[in-house]
């Protein structure tokens, strides 16, 4: 995905440059740059802990009966994509385990459907390891979207190089950086199923990667896909305790604790700025939605003026 | 020729400047909408997705309907009773499974809350075991001090009974009396091995007496897979599930 993005960018830049050359050679003043006055709208949609819930919950009197279902999610996504130009669809992990679809087909159905639904990225929950690293790899090719797993070091496993530390997606000139934090699988996953997976501290990893996304990658929005869990009674890292120890994360899309929120929680980060934390229960009973409006920061005129110089 | 060189130079200069990341317009994000959307039957399902998973669903239902054994009785769950058939079935199966892991295993324990449904009289299918044990809990064997077993029995008595096997007890005024293990009274100076599953061993369902074991064997085997194997083994020996109420826990009035 990152490579793809890069290639597309390269191609785009080339065609822009070619256009620039043509216009320049005719001596016309031009601004083939992005329109600095235009605001950009981005719609972020997300799920977590879908747990192989391909079909809606059965009508068995349980709390979530009749809710969810991938076919309904697909219709809802189509409707939103028809209404909105820039849509991102993300998942915060625990795609696997929970219905016989996983026990029988080892994740094939879940990953194929997510690809059909047009997911842009996902991260690993602890249940992704239920059949070990080999179990993740079994149908890995069915996922036509990247997994961002910033705090799992897979270099000593078969997964080495197959996941991303972070990705950057560009929509209408707005750059969105996405990284992923997983839960410590020790005690959650059978040791043989996470053999050689090295767990890295989520706070340290965030404070290393977010500055890269902000400063080097020039991201306008930083999203963390987290499977750390919303919060705990005991002293354990969670989305709510991560925020005050980090800066510049705009949105945490959470999972693991199956926390069903009506809307995101606002938490203050190390700079006293708001980070949103959202999570939508489990089983795909809700689709998380957050819309952002991006306004160009006008004091930064460098880009436009330099381009005009060239054109002249 | 000169024109071409100018073009190339221009091209290079433009590419450089546009390609340079410091040139990017910066944007300030502001949230304009943030309400999560409920997915219920008001949304018409996408028929292409249903068509995609339909063949898997057919296979899945075939597997769920696969017969693995036969139950001579309707294994009911009667919460108010100190023992009930589906509880005895579950606990008996656990004990057999536990003995296969550690032959010294003498006791087994489940909870009323952990047993989710009843088993119908007649064919037992893979699906019935999924309904009985939908959770991904795994088999765990614990070595317990006799005093801890007593504490467990006190918990069981207070709850008016829990699914157990390998020991018997009576409940008098919410207290355990006449606790017997293999025909011998409970000896608080001895140690005992008990099979249960990780959720309970970790303190789930407010369990008492088993969370500080002398030793613990964690297995990766889910209770459900083991239950399926247990029933299949009975069937391969030409046996039916014929769980009885045997008075393993009774309430003294």
Image (spheres, coloured by chain):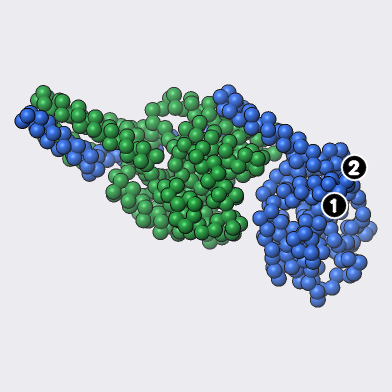
Chain colours: A green, B blue
How far across and how far down the image is residue B67, in percent?
Answer: 79, 38
Q: Nearer the viewer, residue B167 or A197?
A: A197
Residue at 12% from the left image edge and 36% from the top image edge: B9
Counting from the top left corner in percent of width and height, residue A16 is at 23, 30
Secondary element at tag 2: loop
Chain containing mark 1: B
In the image, A10 versus B197, the foreground residue is A10
Residue drawn 43% across and 25% down? A83
Q: Which residue is farthest right?
A: B253
Name the spot of residue B28 as percent of width and height, x first.
31, 40
Vertical position of residue A218 compared to residue A235: above or below: above
Q: Residues within 10 Å of mark 2 (few under 14, many from 20)?
A: few
Specify the subunit that label 2 lies on.
B
A253, above or below B62, in the image:
below
Q: Position of residue B73 (x, y in %)?
A: 89, 42
Which residue does the image show at 87% across and 66% down from the upper left? B181
Q: Which of these two is toward me, A85 or A240? A: A85
- Can you say which quadrant of the picture contains the N terminus of chain B? top left
Asked if residue B13 is positioned above or below residue A255 in the image, the reply reads above
Q: Which mark is residue B72?
A: 2
**Helix, strand, or loop for circle 1?**
helix
N-terminal-most mark, 1 or 2: 2
């Amino acid at each position: 995905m990152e490579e793809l993005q890069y290639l597309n960018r390269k191609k785009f830049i080339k065609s822009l440059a070619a256009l620039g050359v043509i216009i320049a050679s005719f001596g016309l003043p031009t601004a083939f740059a992005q329109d600095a006055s235009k605001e950009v709208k981005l719609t972020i949609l997300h799920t977590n802990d879908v747990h192989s819930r391909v079909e809606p919950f059965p009508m068995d009197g349980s709390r979530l009966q009749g809710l969810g279902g991938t076919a309904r999610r697909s219709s809802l996504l189509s409707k939103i994509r028809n209404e909105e130009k820039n849509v991102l669809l993300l998942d915060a992990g625990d795609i696997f385990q929970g219905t016989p679809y996983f026990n029988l087909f080892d994740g094939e159905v879940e990953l194929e459907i997510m690809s059909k639904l047009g997911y842009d990225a996902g991260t690993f929950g602890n249940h992704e390891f239920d059949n070990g690293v080999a179990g993740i790899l079994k149908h890995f090719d069915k996922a036509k979207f990247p997994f961002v797993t910033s705090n799992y070091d897979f270099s000593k496993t078969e997964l080495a190089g197959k996941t991303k530390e972070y990705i950057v997606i560009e929509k209408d000139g707005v750059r969105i950086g996405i990284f992923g934090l997983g839960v410590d699988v020790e005690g959650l996953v059978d040791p043989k199923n996470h053999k050689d997976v090295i767990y890295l501290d989520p706070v340290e990893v965030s404070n290393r990667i977010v500055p890269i996304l902000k400063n080097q990658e020039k991201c306008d929005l930083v999203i963390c896909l987290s499977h750390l869990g919303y919060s705990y009674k005991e002293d354990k890292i969670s989305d709510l305790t991560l925020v005050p120890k980090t800066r510049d994360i705009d949105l945490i899309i959470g999972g693991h604790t199956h926390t069903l929120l009506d809307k995101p929680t606002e938490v203050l980060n190390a700079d006293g700025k708001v980070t949103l934390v959202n999570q939508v229960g489990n089983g795909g009973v809700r689709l998380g939605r957050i819309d952002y409006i991006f306004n160009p920061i006008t004091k930064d005129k460098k880009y436009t003026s330099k381009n005009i110089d060239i054109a002249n | 020729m000169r024109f071409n060189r100018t073009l190339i130079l221009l091209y290079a200069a433009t590419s450089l400047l546009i390609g340079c990341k410091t040139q990017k317009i910066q944007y300030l994000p502001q949230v304009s909408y943030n309400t999560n959307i409920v997915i219920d039957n008001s949304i018409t399902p996408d028929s292409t997705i249903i068509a995609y998973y339909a063949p898997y669903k057919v296979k899945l239902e075939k597997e769920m309907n696969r017969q693995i054994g036969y139950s001579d009785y309707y294994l009911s769950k009667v919460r108010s009773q100190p023992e009930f058939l589906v509880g005895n079935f579950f606990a008996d199966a656990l004990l057999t499974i536990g003995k296969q892991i550690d032959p010294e295993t003498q006791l087994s324990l489940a909870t009323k809350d952990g047993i989710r449904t009843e088993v119908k009289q007649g064919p037992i299918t893979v699906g019935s075991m999924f309904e009985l044990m939908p959770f991904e809990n795994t088999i765990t064997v614990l070595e317990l001090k006799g005093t801890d077993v007593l504490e467990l029995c006190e918990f069981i008595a207070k709850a008016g009974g829990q699914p157990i096997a390998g020991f018997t007890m009576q409940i008098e005024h919410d207290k355990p009396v006449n606790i017997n293990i293999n025909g011998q009274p409970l000896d608080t100076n001895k140690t005992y091995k008990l099979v249960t599953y990780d959720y309970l061993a970790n303190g789930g369902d407010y369990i008492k007496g088993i969370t500080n074991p002398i030793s613990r064997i964690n297995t990766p085997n889910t209770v459900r897979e083991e239950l399926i194997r247990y029933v299949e083994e009975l069937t391969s020996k030409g046996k039916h599930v014929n769980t009885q109420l045997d008075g393993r826990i009774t309430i003294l009035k």
